[in-house]
Image: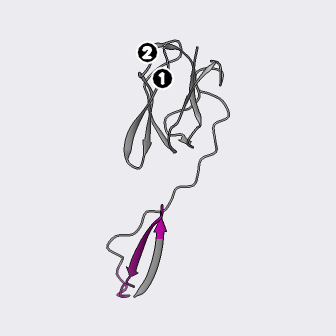
């Protein structure tokens, strides 16, 4: 057994890890391997990136789960433009004001950082 102390967001956790017995059998549950990071997309899928003057930005890092609006669609303040998946939660990214969607700068499955521009409005 090995003891580790881990700090996450200022919270300290003491963790005990037991080594499994080597029986030659496959492990009961193996940790999934991380998939390699995909290269960032060079262009927006539906319009010129940054076409509008009002930015719709990601509030957290995550993966694009669904695109709710389309280029040319009129949206009201608070309408969902993109659904972001972060920590197994679906987070709607909403229009900051009334306008028309000028560009969608991401595609479903894209990994984005907090503050990344996801779409623009006019």
Residue 14 sits in quarter: bottom left
Picture mark count: 2
Q: Is residue 15 left or right of residue 59?
A: left
Q: Which mark is residue 95?
A: 1
Q: Position of residue 25 (x, y in %)?
A: 34, 81
Residue at 59 percent of width and 37 percent of height: 116
Q: Is residue 18 magenta?
A: yes
In the rendered image, the residue lying farthest to the left is: 28
Label 2 Cα crowd, 10 Å radius (few <14 / some 14-19 / many 20+):
few
Q: Does residue 41 lie above or below 105 as drawn?
A: below
Q: Position of residue 39 (x, y in %)?
A: 64, 45
In the rendered image, the residue lying farthest to the front is: 10
Q: Is disc 1 placed on a helix, strand or loop?
A: loop
Judge by depth and name the residue closer to the eye, 1 or 29.
1
Q: Is disc 2 placed on a helix, strand or loop?
A: loop
- Residue range in magenta is 7-25
Q: Earlier in the sequence, mark 2 or mark 1?
A: 2
Q: Position of residue 66 (x, y in %)?
A: 43, 32
Q: Position of residue 36 (x, y in %)?
A: 57, 55
Q: Is residue 48 left or right of residue 84?
A: right
Q: Does residue 82 lie above or below 3 as drawn?
A: above
Distance in Å between CA atoms under marks 2 and 1: 7 Å
Label 2, on which residue? Answer: 76
Residue at 43 percent of width and 86 percent of height: 2
Q: Does residue 10 lie above or below 75 as drawn?
A: below
Label 1 Cα crowd, 10 Å radius (few <14 / some 14-19 / many 20+):
many
Q: Quadrant of the C terminus?
A: top right
Tags 2 and 1 in contact by the CB under 8 Å rule?
yes
Residue at 48 percent of width and 69 percent of height: 7
Q: Which mark is residue 47?
A: none
Q: Is residue 115 magenta?
A: no
């Amino acid at each position: 057994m090995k003891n580790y102390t881990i700090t996450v967001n200022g919270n300290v956790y003491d963790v005990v890890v037991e080594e499994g017995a080597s029986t030659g059998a496959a492990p009961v549950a193996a940790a999934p391997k991380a998939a390699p990071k995909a290269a960032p997309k060079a262009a927006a899928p539906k319009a010129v990136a940054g076409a509008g003057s009002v930015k719709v930005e990601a509030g957290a890092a995550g993966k694009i789960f669904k695109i709710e609006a389309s280029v040319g669609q009129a949206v009201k303040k608070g309408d969902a433009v993109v659904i972001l998946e972060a920590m197994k939660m679906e987070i709607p990214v909403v229009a900051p004001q009334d306008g028309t969607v000028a560009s969608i700068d991401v595609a479903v499955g894209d990994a984005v950082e907090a503050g990344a521009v996801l779409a623009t409005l006019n």
